[in-house]
Amino acid sequence: MTYTIPDEPTKTRWGHLVVRPSGPLLAAMLCGSWMAWPWFVWNAIAMGSPTRRKEIAMCGVAIAGTVAMAFLFVYLWDRDIIDSTTGVRLFALGVATWKLGMAYAIETVQSRTFHVYEYYGGAVQSHYRVITVGYFVGYILLAGITDPFWVIIIAGGL
Amino acid sequence: MDDRQVSMLLQQADRARADHQWSHAIDLLRRALSLDPDHPRAHASLALALLGAQRLHGATIEAGMALAFDGNDSFCHYAAAAVKMAERKLGDAWEHCLVALQADSTDVDAHVLGARIQKMQGQPAAARELLHRALELQPSHVDALTALARVELDTGQLAEAARVIDTALTTEPGNVDAHVIAGFIALRQGDVAAAETHGRFALTQDAVDRDALALWSAIKARKSWSLGLWWRMNAFVSMRTEAGQLALLVGSFVAISLLEILAGAFDLDALERLLSWAWLGFCAYTWVAPSIFRRMLEADLKSVVLDREF
């Protein structure tokens, strides 16, 4: 039996759907979290990443943190503690920083495996078409939502 | 039969590592571990090969496995020290190195590694002492000579650094690390052409060597102020640890966003727009920078095909 080095991905039947981890990162910026976190999870599974549990856990933390921030915003808004445009913008900056920071961190972890995956000839799909579609879907989604709680959860990092 | 085969593969892997043929070394060690998955030295050697190939995560796990299989083996501690040093955990690195040195006080490689750790900890005198001891044990040890030249260079002893690196290059004309140090010395002496020759050679031998890329950036910076700024910025970002790069990027985002919000709060709309566009430009730049970086390097090294590990 051939020895498997711990940082090497295992073969999966979804290998043909793997994208560069910068794809989901770009989605976190341009399309929204609704697309980025599931995409990171899917990419980890499709790649057969040995660190997929960590990557999935990190996505879970990112979502949990965003939900907590959304609850906090609603709480502060209802009690008029945040009552100015500057206040809203500062809070939004906190949310965006959290989302981008987590997306960068997950991308960094996933890239380690991706470089090995690519080196051994793994198939890689272009992510630009998916991001273009995701951008418009995200735009439509956000246009239809007025509840700030869901806007915080769904919106992108930028 | 297996034992003999494993020993032979380990020896071949040692030679491949010495020649910076990381992929070849990794393949040989994979074969060795397929025959004997519990071989501590094979895990340790694999950790060092993975480290050379910039696969720090894998190297960390392999070094841990090596120690788990044999916590008393000096080579396993040596590999663990090298990995910890790459992780910038210098205290742990020094502890492992000490164990390796105590187990075998004639281990020249452990002396050299210890010196590198001491230098990173800001102790050039201790580093120099370790290297002199290493050279007493083996006067023509190229890694020791190269590391000593680096210490002398960093402490401003340019003539001594040049003398030591000449000895290293005479002993082993194709040593990548020696060429990198020779390049830095030539650059400090104002001989950009010689530095370029050394840098070009080093990159052709190992296109993922961070020090060789740092030398190339320094050469570019010396040749042109504007281009140099660009290369230095790339080197500045790429030399950070992953966490450092993350902090730099997210920190820049927060800083510029805060400025934008402040500009908005004080009704400075033009400034707010300017900051917004500047940030967008910076984002676009960082997105395309790696491919520009690669293309420029390929153009500079026309006669060279960068290997897949680049």
Image (spheres, coloured by chain):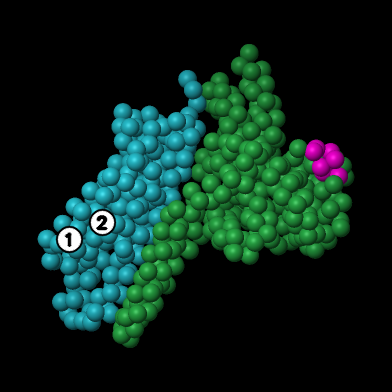
Chain colours: A cyan, B green
Q: Main secondary structure of the magenta part?
A: helix
Relative to B295, is A15 above or below? above
Q: Amino acid at mark 1?
A: Leu
Chain of the residue under label 1: A
Q: Residue at x 47, y 37 (%)?
A: A116
- Name the one closer to the observer, B112 or B270: B270
Classify mark 2: residues with Cα within 10 Å, few (<14), some (14-19) or many (20+): many
State if disc 1 and disc 2 touch (CB < 8 Å).
yes
Q: Residue furthest top?
A: B1
Q: Which residue is mark 2?
A: A32
Q: Secondary structure at mark 1?
A: helix
Label drawn at residue A142: 1
User: How many numbered tags mark residues here?
Assistant: 2
Q: Residue at x 32, y 80 (%)?
A: B269
Residue B184, located in which quarter of the rendered image? bottom right
Which region shows up in magenta? B167-173
Q: Residue at x 59, y 45 (%)?
A: B299
Q: Secondary structure at mark 2?
A: loop
- Name the one closer to the observer, B147 or B161: B161
Residue B90, located in which quarter of the rendered image? bottom right
Q: Residue furthest bottom?
A: B266
Relative to B45, is A141 above or below? below
Q: Is residue A66 magenta?
A: no
- Name the one closer to the observer, B39 or A45: A45
Judge if badges 2 and 1 mark residues of a common chain: yes
Q: Amino acid at mark 2?
A: Gly
Relative to B90, is B176 above or below? above
In the image, residue B187 lies at what x, y percent?
A: 75, 57
